Image (cartoon, rainbow, N blue to C red):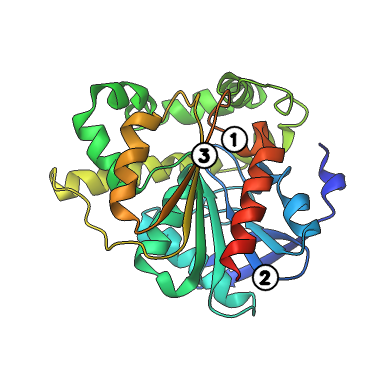
């Protein structure tokens, strides 16, 4: 897919001290799509037209530190959740939106639904467990700890930034393709906007800053578990079962503990970047869920 094919409009909005970039397409009920690491709004390139053409207003921001959005912290979940709530408020569609998030965007979506329920009409997470479920598994599951090795690597000053940006961000292509079973939508050309985004001044450091903020928060808690209120918002979890970094068995069942009614949709033969690898299936699931949430 090429950039010009998406027919999105680009916007900037000032949210307190943060200047945020987002793209938009369509009219109807508001759906906000939140990307993860190491991507940007382009993560949702195959989903945007499908949702917009089905009658939804689709808004997709570059989250704090990513793409064309400002690159200054802090990067803790409370701060980035406030960013998204302010974005929703600025769009003039009422205080609530359907929130869909993948990877770090999924963690943000869980946090928003739990702590800012007044802004969340429905929640869909893709290949991301509830933050408390991940925290529990990371501390008690050797298998998940091994899968999460890169999070510790990202704590090294400077080196991860160098690795991710050298050789025209070739490592980004390798990482995204390496985490896909069907690599059709992961060519170096199609990933060009993501490669360019991470090479913007300060971007790599800002993006990795989310991981550094997470570890700093964990150290501050001194091993105490994360505490969250029960999520009562209508929720769905989509999961590509061949995810190399996040294990279904270790993370999905514990997520149910924090959600009153959770619909789980596993997708076999699919890796971590499920919305790009299986866009037809993901779009169908999202449309079915969103239409039901609107009734």
Percent across and percent down for residue 136 are 23, 40
Residue at horizontal 37 percent and vertical 65 percent from the top: 232
Q: Mark 1 to mark 3: distance in Å?
A: 13 Å
Separation of residues labelled 3 and 2 (CA atoms): 27 Å
Query: Is disc 3 placed on a helix, strand or loop?
Result: loop
Q: Is residue 164 left or right of residue 130?
A: right
Residue 17 visible in this rendered orientation of the protein: no
Q: Position of residue 13 (x, y in %)?
A: 63, 69
* Structural crowding at the residue carrying mark 1, measured as other residues with C-alpha within 10 Å and reported as few (<14), some (14–19) or many (≥20): many
Where does label 3 land, which residue?
37
Q: Which residue is at 65% across, 49% downward?
A: 41
Mark 1 or mark 3, whichever is nearer to me: 1
Indicate the quadrant containing the N terminus: top left, top right, bottom left or bottom right. Answer: top right
Mark on residue 7?
none
Element assignment for label 1: helix
- Above or below, 38 relative to 40: above
Say whether residue 259 is left or right of residue 125.
left
Displayed quadrant of residue 167: top right
Q: Residue at x 64, y 78 (%)?
A: 93
Q: How many marks?
A: 3
Q: Pick the residue in front: 144 or 194.
A: 144
Distance CA(mark 1)–CA(mark 2): 24 Å
Dot 1 corresponds to which residue?
A: 274
Q: Nearer the viewer, residue 207 or 137?
A: 137
Relative height, residue 14 to residue 65 (above, below): below
Q: Is residue 229 above or below residue 212?
A: below
Answer with mark 1 or mark 2, whichever residue precedes in sequence. 2
Residue 55 in view of the camera: yes
**Residue, disc 2:** 29
């Amino acid at each position: 897919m090429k950039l010009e094919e998406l027919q999105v409009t680009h916007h900037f909005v000032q949210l307190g001290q943060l200047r945020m970039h987002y793209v938009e397409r369509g009219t109807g009920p508001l759906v906000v799509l939140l990307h993860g690491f190491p991507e940007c709004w382009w993560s949702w390139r195959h989903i945007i037209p499908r949702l917009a053409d089905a009658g939804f207003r689709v808004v997709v921001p570059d989250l704090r530190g990513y793409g064309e959005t400002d690159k200054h912290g802090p990067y803790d979940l409370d701060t980035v959740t406030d960013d998204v709530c302010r974005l929703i408020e600025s769009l003039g569609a009422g205080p609530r939106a359907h929130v869909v998030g993948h990877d770090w965007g999924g963690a943000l979506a869980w946090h928003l639904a739990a702590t800012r329920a007044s802004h969340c009409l429905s929640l869909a997470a893709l290949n991301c467990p509830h933050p408390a479920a991940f925290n529990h598994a990371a501390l008690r599951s050797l298998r998940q700890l091994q899968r999460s090795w890169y999070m510790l690597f990202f704590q090294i000053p400077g080196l991860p930034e160098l690795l991710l940006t050298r050789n025209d961000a070739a490592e980004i292509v390798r990482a995204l393709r390496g985490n896909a079973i069907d690599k059709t939508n992961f060519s170096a050309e199609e990933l060009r906007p993501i490669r360019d985004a991470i090479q913007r001044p300060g971007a790599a450091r800002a993006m990795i800053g989310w991981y550094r903020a997470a570890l700093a928060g964990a150290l501050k808690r001194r091993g105490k578990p994360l505490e969250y209120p029960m999520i009562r918002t209508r929720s769905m979890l989509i999961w590509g079962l061949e995810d190399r970094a996040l294990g279904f068995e270790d993370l999905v069942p514990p997520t149910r503990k924090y959600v009153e009614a959770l619909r789980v949709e596993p997708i076999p033969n699919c890796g971590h970047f499920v919305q790009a690898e299986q866009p037809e299936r993901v779009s169908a699931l999202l449309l079915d869920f969103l239409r039901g949430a609107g009734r």
